[in-house]
Each structure stands twice: as C-alpha cells, then as structure tokens.
Amino acid sequence: MPGIYLHIPFCKQACHYCNFHFSTSLKYKGELVQAMLRELELRKDYLVEKELDSIYFGGGTPSLLTEAELMLFFENIGKYFTLKPGAEITLEANPDDITPEKLQSLRHTPVNRLSIGIQSFHEEDLRFFNRAHSASEARACLARALDADFNDLTIDLIFGSPTTTDERWAENLNLAFSYDIPHISCYALTVEERTALAHFIKTGKAPAVEEDKAARQYEHLMAEMATHGYIQYEISNFAKPGRFAVHNSNYWRGEPYLGLGPSAHSFNGESRQWNVANNTKYIRLLTNETGFENLPRLAPGLFEIEQLTPVDRYNEYVMTGLRTIWGVELSRLRQIGPEFETYFLQNVQVFIEEGKADRVEDTVLLTDAGKFLADGIAAELFARKD
C-alpha cells in the first residue's frame, strides 16, 4: 500500500555529518509549506491507489512545524487520499523540540508516531556531532513523550564515532532498552562529501572514522538487540515483534510512495523522480502560476525523472532485498527476467561459501557476518547496464 513522504527542509543548526538538504533559516517556512500544498495538488494522481497506510514527515526537522501547519497538510492530503484505519503517521523530532507544550499540540493532530533523533545519550558525542540538544534533553524527551502517551516511538542512535567508546556505545543501548522503546534505528557514522565532518577529517581537526571499531560496535548491537527481544528486520532497523515501521518496510519492499518538498524522492514502480534541492527555486516554481498550468510543464524545473530499466529494477531489488529480513526472493528475480535469476545465483555463490549469505529455499539472505558488508556485497552482485 502506498505512502506519502514530506520533506521539511529546516533545521536549527547543521549537524557535522549530515548531507541531507536543509536550511538553517526559517524565513520562508510559511511560503514553503504553501508550495508543498501546491505540489500535492498538482501530483495528486501520481499514486494510482488512493488509500495510504503511512504518512512520514522527515527532514530536516519537521518538529519545527506548528500545529496549524501540520493540520494544513492533513486537511489537504485528505482531499485526495484516504487513510487506512490505523495508518502510521510519523513525525521526526529533535529532543530539544519535545516540550510538554509541543507534545500537547501534537496530540491535537493525527500524528501517532514520533521518530526522535537522539543519536547519543552522551554529551561528548552530541558536541562532536554538533547536535542542538544536550544529553539531559535526550533522556528527558523520552520520559515526556511516554508520559504523554506517545508509546509508538522510534529513536536514532549513531555508532562508530571517534568519541564513542565501546563502553559508551553499550551505555547508549542500555539506556534505550530501559525506556522499552519499540523501534530503534542505528547507523554507523559515515563521512559524506561536502560535510563539515569531511572537512574536519581532511584538515586534521578530527580523527578519521575507524572501520574496525564500527564493525565491533555493530556486532555488539546485533547481539544486544537479539538478547532484548528485537528483530533486525533491516540492516539498521530493529523492532519488537509486531512493531516494524510501516514506512520503512514499504520502502525496502518496493511499495510506491509520493515525495513532496525540496529534494524529496518519489517512486511508482516504473520510475523514480526527485525534486530540485533548492528551497527558493522550489517555492518560485510552485507559486508562480504563469506558465505552470499543469504538471508536465513543471517537470523540467521542479524534478528529474529516471525510467527504470530491467537492470535498474534488478539492481535496486538486490540492494534493498539483501538489507532486509525478507531477503532476495528468486521468484521476484524471475519476474524481472530469468537471466537475472541465473546471474544472481552464479555471483552470490561465493558469498554463500564464505558464510556471508545463506539460501533458504527460494530466498537468499545475508548472515550476521555479511550484514555489516551489505552495501559492498550488493555492489558485487549488480548487473551492468551494458
């Protein structure tokens, strides 16, 4: 079942590791909200099926939206789509935004799930990341959310940072477990190009990320999650039974979704498209009515489109399938083309022999030994377009 993703490109300050599209100026927040509503109207027919089982406010920092702005989105989505009963409606939030007043305000909206960017419960990590919240706020916000009956929570944690010792990482996990959080996402610190972190490492102002340390902390993560009853349904996502994220699961399983906002991506099974990553240009394209009477005339400036070839579909399915508990199903490969099943089985055999992958009837999955290497293994299995 399809979903809608809304990219809210505003943050109070820039995290050193982040390469997502955002602005630290809120000057045009109101204008951008109106532009996103206009995009929703123009693209209302992108999804063939009109019943949604997920809405996800990501960013950026969607918790910077007011109650009135959130309700504008829900009212307008309701004009063109219906929500499946019990649909998952997630709002990403920073700990410093989760005040009692904010939680009370969110209770007046359809939001029923919070994704909180904790990243770490330790001050040294948070300062290294340049996060806006403190260690005390990281703990306090969880208590506040639970007290406000926001029991459907997920938090993000980062491992492998130069400031994150093995002991500190173990403490982060134990603190998360103590709140009985139903869903936890954990990511290795990666150094992305054109970020402050990349510059600091290049100029010697920060130490390089140690891959061995990250691998060790990932192994500890998998063991502790299993011990505490979490299922690793995707490389970076862990959940209690029955608490898998609908938005995450749909993405990894190739369900269609409509992305709204600057830099947002959309997928309909046959093509992918991504919006311009520029707030000013995005607003201008969507609020200037002259010459933009219909969507096709918007396309050259608002977004780019990539039609997916059979090779693209194969490569994307291998990349996403290997990351999940559902693995790569050979029957799905046969649907793309029997030659892809043959190619995959020939090339995955070496990883099966090395104990990094396993075949269970019609499905190939990564073992624990292969999960930390998932991206590299997938790349080795990709088919070339030529």
Image (cartoon, rainbow, N blue to C red):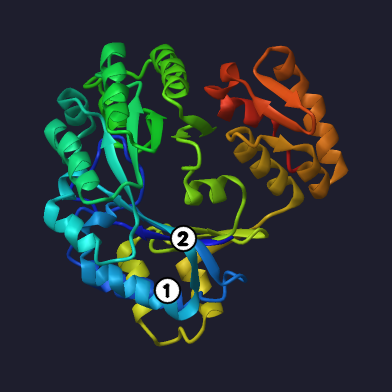
For marks 2 and 1 on the same chain, the one whose residue lies earlier in the sequence: 1
Q: Is residue 340 above or below residue 214?
A: below
Residue in view at x 33 percent, y 60 percent:
111
**Which residue occupies 79% across, 38% down?**
330
Location of residue 55 in the rendering, given as x and y in whole percent from the top left corner: 43, 60
Q: Quadrant of the C terminus?
A: top right
Q: Which residue is mark 2?
A: 87
The foreground one among 245 and 28 is 245
Tell me the distance, in whole angstroms, between the alpha carbons under discs 2 and 1.
Answer: 13 Å
Element at label 1: helix
Q: Quadrant of residue 354?
A: top right
**Residue 207 visible to the viewer:** no
Q: x, y (%) of residue 72?
A: 30, 74
Give the quadrant of residue 362. Answer: top right
Mark 1 highlights which residue? 77
Q: Which mark is residue 368?
A: none
Task: Decide: few, some or many residues near mark 2? Use Cα within 10 Å; few <14, some 14-19, many ≥20.
Answer: some
Vertical side of 49 occupied by 162: above or below: above
Q: Amino acid at mark 1?
A: Ile
Kindly tell me whether residue 323 is visible in this rendering.
Answer: yes
Q: Place residue 344 in its image quadrant.
A: top right
User: Which quarter of the rendering shows the N terminus?
Assistant: bottom right
